[in-house]
Image (cartoon, rainbow, N blue to C red):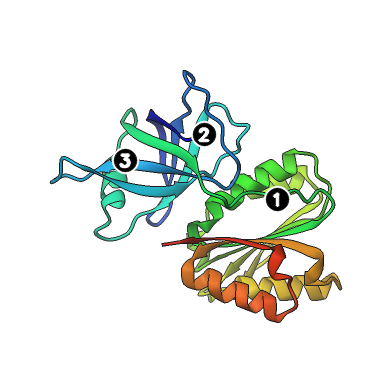
Amino acid sequence: MIKTFEAELIHKEEVAPNIFFLKYKRPLNIDFEYQAGQYMIFHIFSNDSKNSVRRLYSIASSPSNKYSLDFIIELVSDGVGSGYFKKSQLGDKITLQGPAGLFTLKKSEDLKTIFMATGTGIAPILSMLYEKLHSHNKSETVLFWGIKKLSDVYIIAQLNELSVKFPNFHYQICLSRETNELNNPFIKGHVGNGLSQYLQKHSTNIKDYKLYLCGSKNAVDSIKSDLISQGALSESIYFEKFT
């Protein structure tokens, strides 16, 4: 059920150029639950308006985290949300509404899973990874995350921690514009390159996986089309497009 409440900013960190990791205190006075992959609606006031605008941001934290709601947000030029988050300070409160969204994990206890994200599309995917892996699901779980350069990488500590704790989890960060030599888990190219190499190396078939995609509209459309051309089942592909 959708709830409306005030949340306090308790952590703000620029983890990469124009990428902020934000934590808001999770409400304790209301019955609030969400599923991994869902988003919250932020009610944001711009400097020259008495009316709020609404912006949607996916939750990056695990549903089992009862302390905070985490978000990974990219600041863009002239964006109302970006202007607000750039100036926001610890202790600031904002009205949140949610959870909302249908991009959630499907029941697939015995099926292998591939997650593919570009940019801040990693946010709902990270939440899904926490939920799937901590549910003691032992099936193969792989992440391919596409960003531009090594200097753009963040949340690497969280991904490393998951890969150490859960032997069934593997990840590859695909850098589309990096020119320097790279070592695992980094490779040059797009997420499709990483997936192709992985499938070939492990002699496995794309039809054996459930696939979750998240990123910009163009990126998701391109990845989905490529997956289907490789034999992926359309009913096994779930996606969320950022605008």
Q: Which residue is labeled 1 in the image? A: 106
Q: Earlier in the sequence, mark 1 or mark 2?
A: 2
Task: Measure how far apart labels 3 and 2 are at the Cα level.
Answer: 18 Å
The amino acid sitting under disc 1 is Lys
Label 1: element kind: loop
User: Do residues under tags 1 and 2 come within 8 Å of each other at their CB atoms?
Assistant: no
Residue 116 in the image, given as x and y percentages of width and height: 63, 63
Please tell me which residue is depicted at 75% across the width and 46% down the height of the picture: 164
Q: Earlier in the sequence, mark 3 or mark 1?
A: 3
* Horizontal relation, residue 237 to residue 99: left or right: right
Task: Measure how far apart labels 3 and 1 are at the Cα level.
Answer: 29 Å
Residue 127 in the image, given as x and y percentages of width and height: 60, 45
Please tell me which residue is depicted at 60% across the width and 40% down the height of the picture: 35
Instruction: Give the camera-side residue of 47 and 201.
Output: 47
Please tell me which residue is depicted at 73% across the width and 70% down the height of the picture: 233
Q: Which residue is labeled 2 in the image? A: 1
Q: Residues within 10 Å of mark 3 (few under 14, many from 20)?
A: some
Q: Earlier in the sequence, mark 3 or mark 2?
A: 2
The amino acid sitting under disc 3 is His
Residue 74 in the image, given as x and y percentages of width and height: 40, 55
Instruction: Give the camera-side residue of 57 and 151.
Output: 57
The amino acid sitting under disc 2 is Met
Residue 214 in the image, given as x and y percentages of width and height: 55, 60
Q: Which residue is labeled 3 in the image? A: 43
Label 2: element kind: loop
